[in-house]
Amino acid sequence: MKRILLLIMPIILIMLAFRPVKSHTVSGTVTDEKGNPLSSVSVKYKGSSSGTFTDASGKYSFTISSSSGTLIFFHTRLSNS
């Protein structure tokens, strides 16, 4: 019995290590109230380290492992003092 278990366990571990993981791409555009694109906005998937910043045209895109969740947007407005 132990011999069979010792033969099967590595096979099971290898199968688990290489199982396909579904990933999802999250993308969009961040704009202000007037519809102007916002650059350098932090976009993060809540509860993970996944995230990115928007580009000059307000666009972002990154990959997450879940099909549902919450996105957090953070933008610091610089004031001209």
Image (cartoon, grey):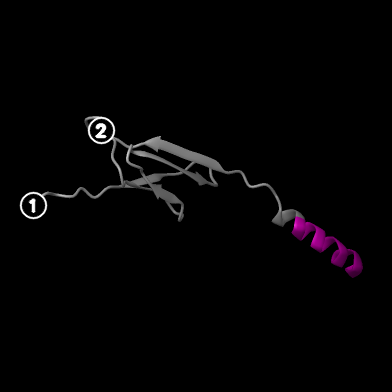
Q: Quick one: label 2, few (<14), some, or many (20+) residues within 10 Å?
A: few
- Whether residue 12 is in magenta: the answer is yes
Residue nearest the viewer, comparing 9 with 65: 65
**The N terminus is located in which quarter?**
bottom right
Residue 12, position as x, y percentages in the image? 78, 57
Percent position (x, y) of residue 53?
37, 47
Find numbered disc 2 in the image and state the secondary structure of the residue it sits on: loop
Q: Mark 2 belongs to which amino acid?
A: Asn
Label count reads: 2
Which residue has dot 1 on it?
81
State if disc 1 and disc 2 touch (CB < 8 Å).
no
Mark 1 lies on a secondary structure that is: loop
Read off the residue under disc 2.
36
Q: Quadrant of residue 47?
A: bottom left
Query: Residue sitting at 89 percent across and 69 percent down?
Result: 2
Which secondary structure is most common in the magenta stretch?
helix
Question: What amino acid is labelled 1 in the image?
Answer: Ser
Residue 55 covered by magenta stretch: no
Answer yes or no: is residue 44 visible.
no
Q: Residue at x 27, y 47 (%)?
A: 75
Residue, far top? 35
Residue 76 vertical placement versus 33 (above, below): below
Viewer-nearest residue: 74 or 36: 36
Over which residues does the magenta segment extend? 1-14
Left or right: 32 as drawn, with respect to 70: left
Residue at image point 55% right, 47% down: 65
Distance from label 2 to label 1 (Cα)? 22 Å
